[in-house]
């Protein structure tokens, strides 16, 4: 007999918004930065074949960095997906999940 894992509860947008409403302003602002970086990273992935990609991403850094995805192999495992972005003059990352 095959055992199945219980389905993960995928949070609905409504539940996510309700949870975020409980956060402090600083955390909400950081989430906004992360979401913007994620949207930019997705745009760059979609435009990877487009010659304008280089023009859009050059001269970006601590004061205006675009988000990008990085796939990492760690100790032979993975790949793991990370979102990399600049915020407050620091290069930050968020673990997205295993691909």
Image (cartoon, grey):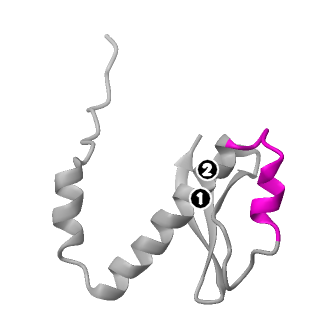
Would you call the spot at circle 2 few (<14 residues within 10 Å), some (14-19), or many (20 or more)? some
> Label 1 near label 2: C-beta < 8 Å?
yes
Q: Measuring from the top left, give residue 44's x and y in whole percent.
A: 68, 51
> Which of the pair 83/59 is nearer the observer?
59
Q: Give the residue at x 33% y 78%.
A: 28
- Side (left or right) of 49 relative to 41: right
Location of the C terminus by quadrant is: top right
Location of the N terminus by quadrant is: top left
Q: Which residues are magenta?
A: 47-58
Q: Measuring from the top left, give residue 70's x and y in whole percent.
A: 70, 55
**Is residue 6 positioned above or below 30 on the image?**
above
Q: Measuring from the top left, give residue 95's x and y in whole percent.
A: 55, 60
Query: Does 84 lie within the magenta span?
Result: no
Q: Give the residue at x 31% y 23%.
A: 4
Q: Residue tagged by mark 1?
A: 40
Q: Measuring from the top left, give residue 81's x and y in whole percent.
A: 62, 51
Q: Give the residue at x 83% y 46%.
A: 51
> Which of the pair 89/43 is nearer the observer?
43
Label ID, residue 43: 2
Under circle 1, the secondary element is: helix
Q: Alpha carbon of mark 2 to alpha carbon of mark 1: how far?
A: 5 Å
Query: Does 49 lie within the magenta span?
Result: yes
- Side (left or right) of 16 relative to 42: left
**Is residue 73 positioned above or below 4 on the image?**
below
Q: Quadrant of residue 57?
A: bottom right
């Amino acid at each position: 007999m095959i055992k199945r894992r219980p389905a993960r509860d995928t949070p609905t947008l409504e539940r996510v918004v309700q949870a975020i409403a409980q956060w402090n302003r600083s955390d909400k602002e950081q989430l906004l930065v992360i979401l913007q970086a994620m949207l930019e990273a997705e745009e760059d992935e979609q435009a990877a074949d487009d010659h304008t990609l280089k023009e859009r991403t050059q001269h970006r850094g601590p004061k205006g960095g675009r988000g990008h995805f990085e796939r990492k192999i760690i100790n032979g495992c993975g790949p793991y997906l990370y979102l990399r972005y600049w915020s407050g003059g620091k290069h930050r990352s968020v673990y997205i999940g295993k691909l």
